[in-house]
Image: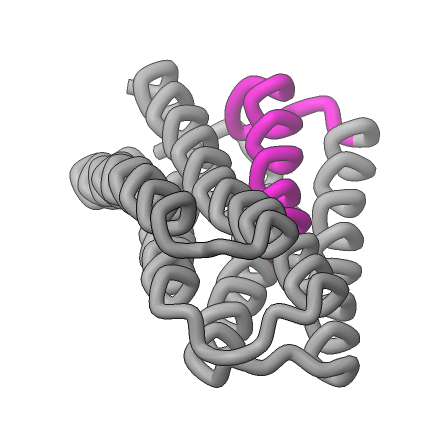
Amino acid sequence: MILRFFPHEFSFFDLLEKQVAQAIEAATLFKELMAKGTIDAVSVNKMREIEHRGDEAAHEVIDRLNRTFITPFDREDIFTLTKEMDDITDIIHTLVGRICVYKLSGVDRNMVQFAALIDGSVQALARAVRGLRTMKEAKSVHEACVETHRLENVSDQLRDAVLVELFETEKDPIMVIKKKEIYEDAETALDICEDVANIVESIMVKQA
């Protein structure tokens, strides 16, 4: 058990799961907004609130890390995992804000696909993070990380395909610039998810 040397009255795992819950909420909202095809001020504010709660959760982990002598795994790994999970929520928040600023309205089937990939990846990461509590979950953690890697590969292919389509069909150069940035940022969200999966896998290897 990873918890064998950790005080019972406090658990970093609770805080990490609290943090990943904010990423789930952000990904779920983003998926809903892309399916709806409209982002208004209310939606932007809602996403901003989620991002703010994500920041608070990350700060809580780091604060505890600075004040705790015994940790369940390497301090550097906890810090890096916390930072990368916060980056997921941050980039989803950024995507929503830029789509609103760029006034990109209507359902974009490409963004619907990206949003589904992001949501699936974050859900897989949540399973992986929850599995860190015990080595008995090593198999499920590994499977969740493999799924995250798979979704990132799919997102790479999707990005390349949508950019080819964009350059071939969109005649407005300003719209090309706007959509290219959004598509690339969406794919970056999957890259960050993969970074989190890599950290989780590294932690499991060290604990084995």
In which quadrant of the rendered view does residue 80 lie? top right
> Is 138 within the magenta?
no
The residue shown at (53%, 77%) is 33
| Left or right of 102 on screen, residue 157 | left
Q: Is residue 32 above or below residue 1?
A: below
- Residue 75 lies, in percent from the top left, at 63, 20
Q: How many labels were placed on the picture?
A: 0
- Residue 11 lies, in percent from the top left, at 59, 46
Q: Quadrant of the C terminus?
A: top left
Q: Is residue 24 above or below residue 43?
A: above
| Left or right of 37 on screen, residue 128 | left
The residue shown at (52%, 24%) is 73
* Residue 14 in view here: no
Q: Between residues 173 and 183, which one lies in front from this camera angle? A: 173
* Residue 203 in view here: yes
Q: How is the image coloured?
A: one colour
- Residue 144 lies, in percent from the top left, at 26, 44
- Residue 55 lies, in percent from the top left, at 76, 51
Q: Quadrant of the N terminus?
A: top left
Q: Please state the extent of the stretch shown in magenta in the rendering.
A: 68-92
Q: Is residue 153 above or below residue 40?
A: above
Q: Between residues 19 and 32, which one lies in front from this camera angle? A: 32
> Is 89 within the magenta?
yes
Q: Between residues 84 and 134, which one lies in front from this camera angle? A: 84
Dominant secondary structure of the residues highlighted in magenta in the image: helix
Q: Is residue 110 above or below residue 61?
A: below
Q: Between residues 160 and 3, which one lies in front from this camera angle? A: 160
The residue shown at (44%, 26%) is 199
